[in-house]
Image (cartoon, grey):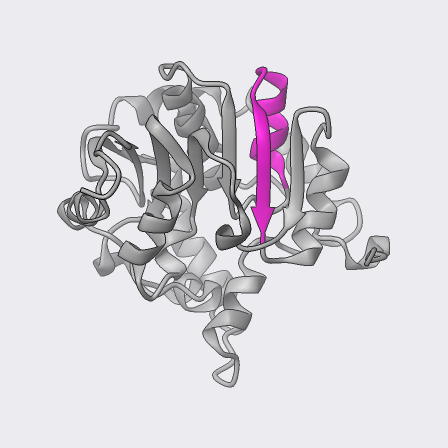
Amino acid sequence: MTETHTLANLLTWYPTPSYLVKRRAILDVLARISARSVLEVGCGAGDLLRELGKRGYTGRGIDLSAEAVATARLKVNPSCFFVEQTELGEIDEQFEVVIASEVLEHCLDDVAFLLGLRERIVEGGHLLLTVPAHMAKWGDNDELCGHVRRYERDQLWQILEQAGFKPLLIYSYGVPIYNLMKPFYDHAVAGKIREEEVIEERTAKSGGMKLLPGGEILFGLLFNDFTMFLFYLLQRCFYRTDLGNGYLAVALNSATRGS
């Protein structure tokens, strides 16, 4: 069945500073991995897939949101990535890299989700995760987005091992710009949390933000790789600290199947 999406129903997405420093951290890591095939789980509006397509990667992107998938299909080169609305369990292929950015914190059973991700990675392939860091920094934006938890470094390392991965590194990203922006995000959404919404509804809303017409163009002019370049350089100085508001974890699927 083919779904028809009007422009009004498409996800209005724009590159916030916190997103851009996260994307840069992911691209920094991928540049050191010899791989071409990628599955992004929870691809949202498709910005990362679009960037990966420009760099020669191919594969698939999946998301539970029909709105996000429709938006991503407008952005992503279909000769590089096939984007679809489906669940992880419906995917049979394996990939050299699986990316799940800001997904794990939504899962009640995060180890089970990691096990599912592992099934989609070739032996010797890599998993890249980004998650919000530090429960002490829990705020209104976590509530609105349907997060179950924020992670500590040791906790994240441990659950990767429990799922059969070999953790390679955990970077703390976003210093200083994400740290500065988080209080603003929490304040901006403080009045939007509705207690009657179940966590699944909040999760579905976490993939995009609405702006007035033309707002995404303004954000694109204000926040881009050129205007954010200094912040990209600064955050690299803090990758191995615990000072950021987010973690980027890289793990190897090296364990023998069935072990």
- Does 171 sit above or below residue 204? above
Q: Position of residue 52 (x, y in %)?
A: 56, 24
Side (left or right) of 177 relative to 43: left
| Picture quadrant of residue 231 | top left
Q: Inspect this view and state whether residue 13 appears.
A: no
Residue found at the far front of this picture: 258
Q: Residue drawn 13% across and 46% down?
A: 154
Is 60 included in the stretch rendered in magenta?
Answer: yes
- Does 171 sit above or below residue 106? above
Q: Position of residue 59 (x, y in %)?
A: 58, 30
Is 78 included in the stretch rendered in magenta?
Answer: no
- Say which of 140 and 146 sits in front: 146
Q: Residue drawn 23% across and 38% down?
A: 165
- Does 10 sit above or below residue 202? above
Side (left or right) of 140 relative to 59: left
Q: Position of residue 250 (x, y in %)?
A: 29, 32
| Picture quadrant of residue 247 | top left
Q: Residue drawn 45% across and 54% down?
A: 184
**Quadrant of the rendering where the C terminus is positioned:** top left
**Quadrant of the rendering where the N terminus is positioned:** bottom right
Side (left or right) of 95 relative to 104: right
Residue found at the far bottom of this picture: 196
Q: Residue drawn 23% across and 53% down?
A: 134
Q: How many marks?
A: 0
- Does 164 sit above or below residue 96? below
Q: Inspect this view and state whether residue 19 appears.
A: yes
- Say which of 148 and 58 sits in front: 58
Please state the extent of the stretch shown in magenta in the rendering: 46-63
